[in-house]
Image (tube, grey):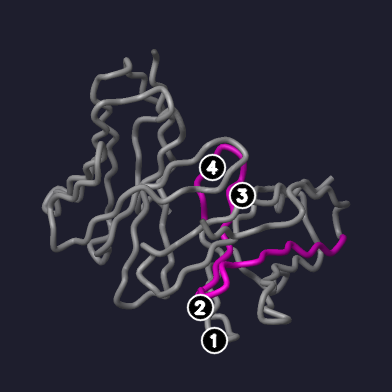
Amino acid sequence: DQQVKQNSPSLSVQEGRISILNCDYTNSMFDYFLWYKKYPAEGPTFLISISSIKDKNEDGRFTVFLNKSAKHLSLHIVPSQPGDSAVYFCAASVRGTSYGKLTFGQGTILTVHP
Amino acid sequence: EPEVTQTPSHQVTQMGQEVILRCVPISNHLYFYWYRQILGQKVEFLVSFYNNEISEKSEIFDDQFSVERPDGSNFTLKIRSTKLEDSAMYFCASSEWTGAYGYTFGSGTRLTVV
């Protein structure tokens, strides 16, 4: 099941710079997309989401961009901080027909160096 | 901030034994979920539960698995006869409504089947 893919297993960024994490999906029924952050020994923590009717959503240092025609979304973190180092998961859902089931990507390990 | 609590944090069991993983969702949440993550793989949906019944389940959730909300506060996942391949992190989550943006995950139970 490769409906949601994060092709970069890892990303290394200098503190203060921009981190860009990418995610592709194949299921055109997905209408809601989320980014989760996960530290070791903890559950995923919700970061930011976007509905398919929008192409951008911002929350502080985090911005998610959605390109529906390309079936691609990205998470921008500006400026990156060492505390942002974690695994980032992209997830998608079909809100209209599903009871909240999320389909996750494989995750990208972000390391922010001081 | 309200939390989803999972116990135990780590469970080791012999192959063929039954295990029960326990979760206390956030008190005003109505939708409950189990996900699992096999080491190095994606977080995968197992089951969603609403109004005291299963609302959706994945093909992973076969007859060996069952869920229950026995007393209005706990939400349990039972694996009847564990297999080696059931070794994974199991995450419970709850949400106030469907749509996934209200999702809160617990810290997980690491199940090791030996």
Real-space CA distance between mark 2 and mark 4, rounded to the nearest whole angstrom: 28 Å
Q: Chain of mark 1?
A: B
Residue at 76%, 49% (x, y): give it.
B84
Query: Could you say whether the residue bearing mark 4 is in a helix, strand or loop?
Result: loop
Residue at 32%, 18% (x, y): give it.
A13
Within 10 Å of disc 1 (Cα), the crowding (few <14, some 14-19, many 20+) is few
Label 2 or label 3, whichever comes before in sequence order: 2
Q: Is residue B25 magenta?
A: yes
Real-space CA distance between mark 1 and mark 4, rounded to the nearest whole angstrom: 31 Å
Query: Could you say whether the residue bearing mark 3 is in a helix, strand or loop?
Result: loop
Q: Are marks 1 and 2 on the same chain?
A: yes
Label 1 or label 4, whichever comes before in sequence order: 4
Image x and y of residue A44, in percent: 49, 48
Query: Could you say whether the residue bearing mark 1 is in a helix, strand or loop?
Result: loop
Direction from residue B29 to residue A76 in the image, left or right: left
Residue pointed to by mark 4: B41
Residue pointed to by mark 3: B107
Of tags 1 and 4, which is closer to the observer? 1
Of tags 2 and 4, which is closer to the observer? 2
Label 3 or label 4, whichever comes before in sequence order: 4
Residue pointed to by mark 1: B51
Q: Chain of mark 3?
A: B
- Callout 1–callout 2 Cβ contact below 8 Å: yes
- Callout 3–callout 1 Cβ contact below 8 Å: no
Real-space CA distance between mark 3 and mark 4, rounded to the nearest whole angstrom: 17 Å
